[in-house]
Image (cartoon, rainbow, N blue to C red):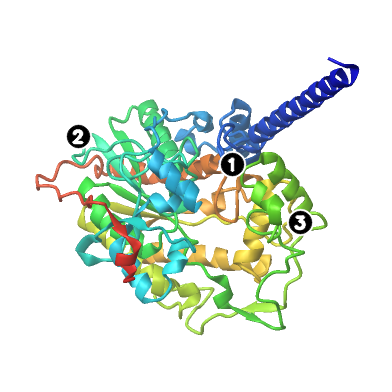
Amino acid sequence: MGTREKKAVQWRRRLLAVLLSSFLGFLVVEIGLRLIDGYAVFAFRLEETGAPDVEEEASSSEGKARAAALIARAEQGGIVKPGWFVLDPPPLGSFPVDPRYRERRDRFRREQINYAINLGYLQQRSREGDIDVILRGSRPETLFVFDGPDGSPHPAFRYPVSVTLPSGLTTNDQGWRGPQVSQKKPPGVVRIACVGASTTVCSHHFPHSYPELLQGWLNVWANRREIPVRFEVINAGREGLRPADTAAIVKYELAPFEPDYIVYYEGANHFRPQQQMRFLEDYSEKPPADLVPSRRGTREGGGMLEDLAEYLAVARRIHLLTALRGMSGQEPQKPRQEIIFPDELDEQSLDPDRLGGFLRLDKDVIPELDRIRDEAREIGARMVMTSFCWMVQDGLELNLSVRRHAFLFADLNRLAWPVSYANLRRLVDLQNRIFAAWSVERGVAFIDVASAMPVHEDLFLDSVHTTLLGTRIRAWCVFEGLVPVLIRDLEAGRIPRRASGQPPRTAWNPTVREMKLADIIGG
């Protein structure tokens, strides 16, 4: 081999070594960023797993200690102990993820593509011309569907039963998040059903939802006070549910399981603050792109870099930093505005039956709350109402270089645009006061979770969804509020209930089938 050929071989070897070392270096950085930013290390497309940047290290002893110090208050005469806050329920376990679920999720970029949807609901939305809102622009060949109870379009959807979805959600044989629940309630068991939407089911990749934490603490409390009962807490929440869906879940899904309490926590999916506002000067229909990032924390239309950000943590980090350059975390300039109060509504003496359409509560919410209360009474259960937590306050300033802060900023200034933070705060507080007034009027127990929950941006993923640490604190607020209700009912002999002796209702668990989209919407 001549000198020239030797140099060429050496050059190729050096180039290969440089490329290999560069690739290995990039791989180390990519893996490191995936660990830091909370993505699955070996996933082809970036999948969030709940890392410290997103979840505040709530599973660490240090994180729990900080939170315990944050929520430590008077011990209510020794009823509950703040030290219980750090206790975890036993791990749930999981099933192998069905490859078909993963393939459908990856192809359509939506976890909901694997849910079973109420056929009546789909057909109703198709007739109204907004089927694409449900499908979010995707056109799958088939959907999983079921027939609603008594032909009703509610509940709008159900999770698949006894599965672990690619999102991390594990369901039982009723399609609820959490462990198995026998329909026949064992003697000495007090059963609590938590209903609501995404803030009840909680982020799918969280190791525990708030009802699971609640169950663990209630049983510790009962054991320490030597109360001869065991608590079971059902999580019947699903993201995106409206109050009418929740009322149907209570009637058809939960009633056969004879819960003793039904805890309602929801206040966002019907909430449209713009409808209650009068804007006193012109404004753009959408927030300025140079002032407000997208809900992913970036500007819209990011091109190739945004496409790569679907797969590479390095690209996503670069995209975030470049897209947010020059953006401020202060509230953007908004038009002068005022809240429109109906003549029927008296802020000083709220009557839940005289709201004049305020926030559509008397149309979309109050009637469904009444149905839930009535259904609870029919089965011998007691409804517990709660206030709803929002992360918004006048003068809020966020650090947009923190991913969750950028997402919170986008959520506040896109979904509610152009309502000011001050007016949002006033509206959500007034809605909670209406919830409290409804509870008094209807004789329903009320837990003021929103007043007990710290309003801090590090406890929230967006305006209503909490981080893992925030979810633990919110669960604790429910726990503290629920214990006095339980004590009164224990002392009155109301719980644990004796078996009624009546044959239980048949549990509603519909057959799910796969159906062509063309057959659903008529071509």
**Residue on which the image places disc 1:** 46
Disc 3 + disc 1, Cβ < 8 Å:
no
**View extreme (right): residue:** 3
x then y, percent, for residue 270: 47, 67
Quadrant (top left/top right/bottom left/bottom right) for the N terminus:
top right
x then y, percent, for residue 157: 35, 57
Which of the two residues, 8 or 224, is positioned nearer the viewer here? Answer: 8
How crowded pointer 2 is (Cα within 10 Å; few <14, some 14-19, many 20+) is rated as few
**Residue on which the image places disc 3:** 329
Can residue 447 be seen in the rendering of this structure?
yes
**View extreme (front): residue:** 2
Specify which label sits upstream in the sequence, 3 or 1: 1
Left or right: residue 270 versus residue 222 is right
Left or right: residue 56 versus residue 385 is right
Can residue 425 be seen in the rendering of this structure?
no
Q: CA distance from mark 3 to mark 1?
A: 26 Å
Q: Does dot 2 land on a helix, a strand or a loop?
A: loop
**Residue on which the image places disc 2:** 187
Name the residue rendered at 40%, 44% in the picture. 101
Which of the two residues, 53 or 352, is positioned nearer the viewer here? Answer: 53
Badge nearest the viewer, 3 or 1: 1
Name the residue rendered at 63%, 28% in the picture. 62
Amino acid marked by disc 2 = Pro
